Structure formats: structure tokens, C-alpha cells
Image: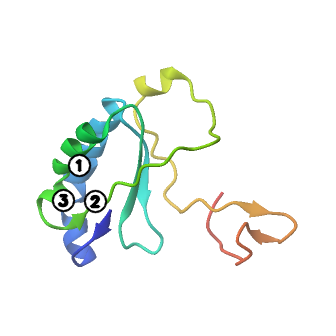
Amino acid sequence: MTYLVDLSEVDAALPEHVAWLDQQYADGVFIASGRQVPRVGGLILVAGTNREDLERRLALDPFGRLGLAEHAVIEFVPPESLAVSSSCSDSAPIRRHRKPIVLRTPELGSDAFGNGSSYGP
């Protein structure tokens, strides 16, 4: 998703967008979501649905309906992934990470990209 307007307009619609996200998590379709860094849009990781259903759901996103953002669907087939328990779809979304998550490597003494970022756990 890419924002099309000033962040103040995005922030004004954020509570309605978060309610929409919560419904998608409750339906077991979204498995992760968050802001891009820098904050030019967001990303949603989806599983357990088809393209038609996803497009229908995205059309209901307040950010899109209000002309604040546009969605782009990128399908991929991961050759590897972490096994996740089916019970995860019964859980409420976990909203613990407020900072971007960046992997750290002891060898570099910084994040995995070697740029000394202060973000992450």
C-alpha cells in the first residue's frame, strides 16, 4: 500500500483503518501488517484466501475508499517458511512492535544491513 496524501490525512483515518485490519485478522486472512520505513505506506502479509476475496477485502479498506492510499497485490511462492500453528488464526492480533524490526548481527555490531540502525529489539 502506498499513501497518496499527507500523513495528517492518513492519521485522521487510522482508527477506522485499524478496525478494518482487526476484522481481517479475526477472519484469519491477515497474518502481519505494518508501516513502511520511511512512512510512505504499509505492507500486509496475507494467507488463506484467493485473489478475488483479497481484492474484495482491500476495496473495503478505509484508506483506499477515502482515496488516501492505493493497494498493490504482489503474489509470491515462498520456497521456505516458518511453520505456524493453525491455532494462530483464533488469536487476536499482537500489537507489540511499535518500532521497525531490524535484525542485528554481532559481527557487524549493527543491524543486518550494516547501517548501525537503532531500531529493533
Contact (CB < 8 A) between labels 1 and 3?
Answer: yes
Identify the residue under disc 1.
58
Horizontal and vertical percent position of residue 71 = 28, 59
**Relative to 5, 88 lies left or right:** right
Residue extending furthest toward the right: 107
Image location of residue 72, percent across then percent down: 32, 60
| Figure check: 111 above or below 103 | below
Alpha-carbon span between mark 2 and mark 3 = 7 Å
Kind of residue at badge 3: Gly
Q: Are marks 2 and 3 in contact (CB under 8 Å)?
A: yes
Q: Residues within 10 Å of mark 1 (few under 14, many from 20)?
A: some
Q: Which residue is mark 2?
A: 71
In the picture, measured across the screen, residue 116 lies left or right of residue 85, that is right
Residue 71 versus residue 61 in the image, above or below: below
Q: Nearer the viewer, residue 48 or 111?
A: 48
- Asked which secondary structure carries label 2, the reply is loop
Which element carries disc 1, helix, strand or loop? helix
| Residue 4 placement (x, y as % from top left) | 23, 74
Crowdedness near tag 2: few (<14), some (14–19) or many (≥20) residues, C-alpha within 10 Å: some
Residue 66 lies, with reference to residue 9, above or below; the image says above
State the CA–CA distance, disc 1 to disc 2.
7 Å
Q: Disc 3 designates what residue?
A: 64
The amino acid type, in three-letter code, at marker 2 is His
